[in-house]
Image: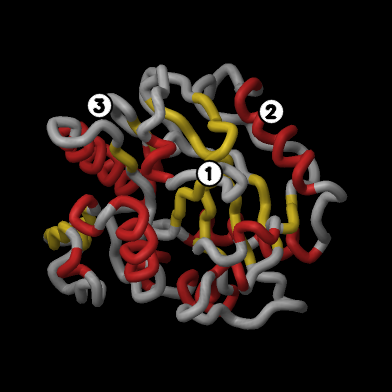
Amino acid sequence: MVRNDTFYADKWINYYGAQFGYKNLYLFIDGEDQQSPKMSDKINCFQEPHIPMKRAKGDRYRARKISYFAQSLFKKYEVVLAMDIDEFLVLDPNVEGSLSDYLLSNFQMDSISALGIDVGQHKNLEQPIDLNKPFLSQRRFAQVSDRYTKPIVAFKPLTWGSGYHRVKGKNFKVDEYLFLFHFGLVDLDTTLLKITDKEITEAGWSGHMDRRLALFQDILKGPVENTESFIVTARTYFNTTRKWYAWNKPSPIKGNAVIEIPDRFKSIV
């Protein structure tokens, strides 16, 4: 579901269309005042009236709506994914085969998560993003994130919590070869414009966005020494570490979690 986006939608359609076929994509446009993405005629695109809501209520509404819709898709599909428009599920290029084939492996569980990789701009080393080039060819650094280690892949009908950060009543496994690249802060200028948007501030997003801006400062501090070993350690940590009040979501990593994105991902997204 997308609203007020001129940045990610066509890249999202292009990427997932190439992975799964365009007619297997479903996108909800939040608001009849919104322009459809340029490539919307290639996918299943639904435009609905916008209902103004505060951030928390809106998150719950979207998760519930998409969950109900996703449940209905199991009449036709074996695997269903749900994600935000700025999130891109990637199979490790070291694994042979396509993302589609990999997801059709015999997973003995209701859902799985990819390892969350929160990509940001190093403002001293990197230029504003060029939408005509792969994002990962222009960005070197990211933060391994519990927030984006999300169970977006479903093998059975289920219900996601707000933001797809958890599955209600169920735990999930962080897969060994899947990565979820989050590009919400891939461009500093775009982010700064977004946080001053009147609709966003009135809906109560200001505090959330202010916290998210810390990513830019974390990236300036530099990456861990060995990205590959850190990725393995982080995946194990997210699979095994839970807080008692959030037993079906990974706990945050303490300390530095910034990595240098491995070169093998540069041309993918």
- Mark 1 residue element: loop
Percent across and percent down for residue 220 are 78, 65
Q: Which labelled disc corresponds to residue 96? A: 1
Q: Residue at x 53, y 24 (%)?
A: 246
**What's the distance in space between the residues labelled 3 and 1, CA to CA?**
28 Å
Would residue 52 be visible to someone looking at this image? no
Percent across and percent down for residue 52 are 24, 58
Tag 3: residue type? Answer: Pro
Q: Quadrant of residue 140?
A: bottom right
Residue 37, compared with residue 60, is above or below; it is below
Of residue 148 and residue 268, the one placed in the foreground of this image is 268
Of residue 22 and residue 240, the one placed in the foreground of this image is 22
Q: Which labelled disc corresponds to residue 237? A: 2
Q: Is residue 162 left or right of residue 267?
A: left
Classed neighbour count for the residue bearing mark 3: other residues with Cα under 10 Å, few (<14), some (14–19), many (≥20): some
Of residue 75 and residue 28, the one placed in the foreground of this image is 75
Image quadrant containing the N terminus: bottom left
Residue 13, compared with residue 90, is above or below; it is below
**What's the distance in space between the residues labelled 1 and 2, CA to CA?**
26 Å
**What's the distance in space between the residues labelled 3 and 2, CA to CA?**
27 Å
Classed neighbour count for the residue bearing mark 1: other residues with Cα under 10 Å, few (<14), some (14–19), many (≥20): few
